[in-house]
Image (cartoon, grey):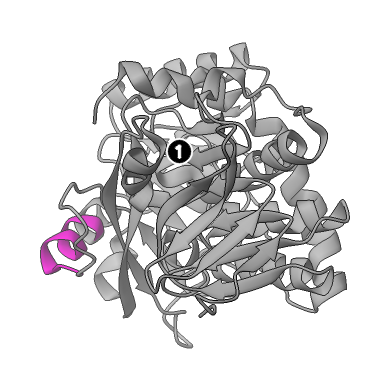
Amino acid sequence: MTNPESPETADIVIVGGGIIGCLTAYYLAQRGLKPTVIEADGIASGASGTSAGWLTPYSHECDAAMLALSPATLRLHAGLAETLPAVTGIDHGYRPGAYLRCAVSDTGVTELREFQAQRASEGVDMEWLSGEETRAMSPWITAEVIAGLRSDNEPTVDSYRLTMSALQAAEMNGARVISGRVIGLLSSSEGAASGVRLEDGSEVHGGAVLLAMGPWSGEAATWLDHPVPVRPQRGQLVYLASPKDGDGPELEVGLNIVEHGGSLIRKRLSDTIVAASREFVGFDTSITTSARDELLLNAARLSDRIQNARISGQTACLRPYSADGRAYVGSVPGWDNAYLATGHSGEGIHYGPVTAAAVAGLIADGASEYDIAPLTPARAGNTTV
């Protein structure tokens, strides 16, 4: 909490302690600035702490403008996997590895062929496999797979550890964290953002404000007098414990059956994940047996090992779902020094580094080295959610 009678000051005020807020603080602190992160609940308490941590741009809309940023964000992720653990001592579980999309019907083969062709047009090569070659890659595959597509550029991370490590590295370079709920934006007489007002009546002043509030970003529309068409989408995950001795091998590659959706995601620091539901139920973060059963049923269509697997947990998180499937990243129309970074749906961990680096460039240098023009918040005035 801050003191209402003695406002806090910061170079940059960042509202939201998720992956984007914490990584932006990290990149700004590397530039010698001292940002303050304000979080209403806890750092990585939302989707950034409970997401599957699968670094893929292909889990939701496959928007062209977002896909164009995927190579850059993967390079940044690889760099963070080297630099952050060396600085903070936190291993965030970065794990390169193969991912197999499997087909069990002619319809699925057609879908895979179209997916491969689209990726090739973007410069991403994926290897086509026969059914026999696909099954040979993983003893978990027990369905009569007739074709597969192998990807080697979709790593995994522990999203909670990554977020916490980024924040800790930022704090080591002068960033601060404040607990509180922001209820409004402060502005100068010239119409520039100059800080935020908290629910307890206190204020935090800063030379710029970044709103990285995830599914709660819609609250900022009244502060900005500009639409922020973002709504929450619940995503549930089921966790499978490691096999006991005699129960069979560990899952070594990620798996998907294209006809039924869902994914089996191998993690280095946690149990295997069965992902993921997509539900519009408001801000309800409860877990449900219906989602669990559907996820397991879809996975069992690919691997009958699911029938004997031990469930070790189930989680639910809220993703920020934008009106047009594309994130809102950049300067807010009608404001100076006010920035927005939200609406990444289920790919916030994947696009977190490039988003944070782009916003840090805008704030610190006046320009981004990444092409985020198609992500401009200005387009939000033409959409509803």
Q: Which residue is drawn at 81% across and 69% down?
A: 174
Instruction: Name the spot of residue 36 as percent of width and height, x first.
Output: 65, 64
Q: Name the side, left or right, on which 102 lies relative to 187.
A: left
Is residue 305 rendered magenta in the image?
Answer: no
Instruction: Name the spot of residue 172 as percent of width and height, x first.
Output: 82, 74
- Direction bottom: furthest residue: 245
Q: Is residue 226 above or below residue 35?
A: above
Observer able to see residue 140:
yes
Residue in front for this viewpoint, 144 or 331? 331
Label 1 sits on a secondary structure element that is strand
Instruction: Name the spot of residue 294 as percent of width and height, x first.
Output: 17, 56
Q: Residue at x 39, y 74 (%)?
A: 200
Residue in front for this viewpoint, 165 or 96? 165
Residue type (three-letter) at the residue carrying disc 1: Arg
Residue interval drawn in magenta: 287-295
Q: How crowded is mark 1: few (under 14 residues within 10 Å), some or many (20 or more)?
A: many
What residue is pinned by disc 1?
101
Instruction: Name the spot of residue 339 as percent of width and height, x first.
Output: 57, 38
Is residue 290 rendered magenta in the image?
Answer: yes
Q: Which residue is drawn at 59% across and 55% down?
A: 14
Q: Name the side, left or right, on which 315 lies relative to 255.
A: left
- Direction left: furthest residue: 290
Q: Is residue 211 above or below residue 197?
A: above
Q: Name the side, left or right, on which 69 lies relative to 321.
A: right
